[in-house]
Amino acid sequence: MLGLVVKFVLLMAVNALVLLGIQVMLSAGEGKNVIYAVVAAIALVVIDYIYLSPRAIAGKYLLPGTLFLLVFALYPVIYTMYVSFTNYGTGNILAKGQAIERIEQNSIGAAEGAVRYDLQIVAEDAPTGALAYLLTDTDGNWFLGTAEGLAPVATEDVDQSTTKPTIAGYVALNAGAAQDRADEIAAFRVPTEGGEIQNDGFSEAFAKLQRLKYDSATNTVVDTVDGTAYTEKDGAFVSADGDRLDPGWRAFIGTANYERINSENVRGPFLRVFVWTFVFAAGSVLLTFGLGLLLAIVFSNERMKGRKFYRLVMIVPYALPSFMTALVWRGMLNQQFGIINRVFGFDLPWLDGQWMPYASILMVNLWLGFPYMFLVCTGALQSIPGDLKEAAVVDGATGFTAFRRVTLPLLLITVAPLLIASFAFNFNNFNIIYLLTEGRPPVSGSVAGRTDILISYTYKLAFSGGRGQDLGFASAISVIIFAIVASISAFSFRYTKAFEEIK
């Protein structure tokens, strides 16, 4: 009975949260939010059916994992692919309606030849009455500005006997009364032929003009001063001369981001980063696996004294946080103050120059990665039956031949999938690159540094490129990275099935 009560309470809480979220999404009014609301509603119906129906027992156990898979794994991939076909980034963050509103607001400024007036805010009959502006120009002429327009006022009609001038039928607002009606005063406009007179604080005013106006009938923005028309193009309003109005908005631009990869200023840096990413990932796997396997073979000799202690020492780099170790190595490899150059008397630019940074990155990653391979290979070697090695020796095989013909193939049956996973990890090993070199040394005219890999290059494009945030292009690079890693992994898993035939 208690379990049933708990189930209903949890279901009611879930329903309340989802329904509240649907209401918020629908109130936003954007098409994307409507889609999210529909998906949330469908998910809620499925959840209620599965947990209230006695015929969906299996679904009660499968649903939580499935939802987490969809939300945290599948949705980010789909959304990244969607963003890669848009212009999402700096200057194109807002929705179209918000961008139009911002363009119109930003175009409001002082009209050409606008006169600045001294301002006294007045109200009709009482401080709470209809607002009006009592204005004085630089020549001492008086005007009364109301919501209907601007009218001249004779000097003798203005009562200047007090500190705040006024006219018959109106009362002057003191600072307190004006502050109480601050929002009304900010929205108050006096229409004139030269623009709308607006207050500039509580003591001055001048005519302002909205230069740019959106025409919904033609979907253009028109300059009311010179008549220039700005038409919609790739999420922005652009004139015939190519002048663009900012801000733009998020818009679908097709394969433009992917086509940019083949452009002259992107193709060279991208290919350089692409090649280094492959070299870094493959080199890291080969070096860490080679050293890890060598140490595993050495310390698997039962005649070695103290091998338990040595094995413990070997995994120390693996036990330390990688981000901390990378920063320590960065300090040790500093050309001027690093301990390596100071102790050995070197003056090597470990993290600068043309080739040294590559070697330094591979060396540090070898230090960080070999303990994992050492542990894996140690376990794999212990699982290989000893009689197979003895049979090979009896048949006349030397130690190296027995290793190459018997031990290594059997080892790869276990280790090959882990090598593929290690390649995929290093292909996107952002930490070691960013913490050790931040992609340096820089390359003139390129966002990508000499040691950037695809993932760090993508980060710079998304958050610190010369054009500001370029999330659409960065998403396109991310999709390419995903496709490359997925293809290599699929091919490698298919290829490694050959090892399964070795028994």
Image (tube, grey):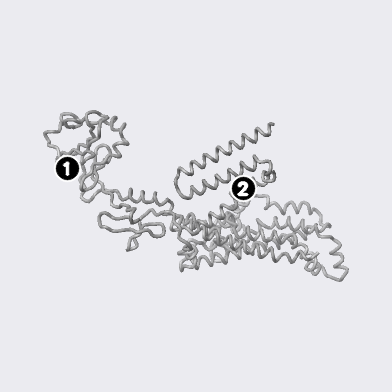
Q: Nearer the viewer, mark 2 or mark 1?
A: 2
Q: Is residue 458 above or below residue 187?
A: below
Mark 2: give few (<14), some (14-19) or many (20+) Cα within 10 Å: few
Disc 2: which residue: 68
Q: Is residue 466 left or right of residue 310?
A: left
- Image quadrant for the N terminus? top right
Q: Residue at x 68, y 43 (%)?
A: 55
Secondary structure category for the residue under label 2: helix
Q: Is residue 423 left or right of residue 82?
A: right
Q: Quadrant of residue 167?
A: top left
N-term mark: 2 or 1:
2
Q: Residue at x 54, y 48 (%)?
A: 39
| Residue 364 visible | no
Disc 1: which residue: 138
- Camera-side residue of 182 and 461: 182
| Residue 340 visible | yes
Instruction: Return the x and y of residue 395 as percentages of the image width and height.
Output: 87, 70
Instruction: Return the x and y of residue 484 as percentages of the image width and height.
Output: 59, 63
Residue type at tag 1: Thr
